[in-house]
Image (cartoon, helix red, strand yellow):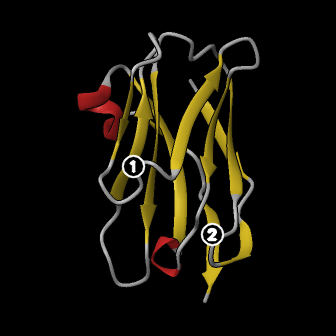
């Protein structure tokens, strides 16, 4: 069983930066795809970014060029560096880990961390 603990959210002004961490425990996730999703008030959860075990990355169009996903398998941890934040990025961010990109949403989830971007 894998447990994920996401952290690093907070309040930041437009144009600011935050880094989210996703620490895995219980077993290694080095062979898993890790990803980030977000859910804004009144909206459905949406895909943000993912990184496969080979290091291949995927981004939603809304964050491409501003967010960077990475991982440190030695630390069993994934990261989401968020730059040039906009009020539209305000949401609860969730990390996830799954066998592959197609099934990541059916895998393991963190508890979520709030990101608020003020204008």
Vertical position of residue 11 compared to residue 8: above or below: below
39 and 63: which is toward the camera = 63
Please state if 103 lies on the left or on the right of 116 as rendered: left
Which residue lies under the disc numbered 2? Answer: 115
- Above or below for 37 versus 76: below
Q: Residue at x 32, y 21 (%)?
A: 100
- Residue at disc 1, secondary structure: loop
Residue 30 picture location, percent across and down: 56, 12
At x 35%, y 33%, the residue is 104
Q: Position of residue 4 (x, y in %)?
A: 63, 38
Q: What's the residue at 30%, 28% (across, down)?
A: 101
Residue 33 sits in which quadrant? top left
**Residue 63 occupies quadrant:** bottom left
**For the residue labelled by badge 2, is the local secondary structure a helix, a strand or a loop?**
strand
Q: Residue furthest left?
A: 102
Residue lying at the far bottom in this picture: please name it.
119
Residue in front for this viewpoint, 111 or 13: 13
Q: For the residue carrying disc 1, how many other residues have a C-alpha within 10 Å: few (<14), some (14-19), or many (20+)? A: few
Name the residue that disc number 1 marks.
64
Q: Is residue 62 left or right of residue 82?
A: left
């Amino acid at each position: 069983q894998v447990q994920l603990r996401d952290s690093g959210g907070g309040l930041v002004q437009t144009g600011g930066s935050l880094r989210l961490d996703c620490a895995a425990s219980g077993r290694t996730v080095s062979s898993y795809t890790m990803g980030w999703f977000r859910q804004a008030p009144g909206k459905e959860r949406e895909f943000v970014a993912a990184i496969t075990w080979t290091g291949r990355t995927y981004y939603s169009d809304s964050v491409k060029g501003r967010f960077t996903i990475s991982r440190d398998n030695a630390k069993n941890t994934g990261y989401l560096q968020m730059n040039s934040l906009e009020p539209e990025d305000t949401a609860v961010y969730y990390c996830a880990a799954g066998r592959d990109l197609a099934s990541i949403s059916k895998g393991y989830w963190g508890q979520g961390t709030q990101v608020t971007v003020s204008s």
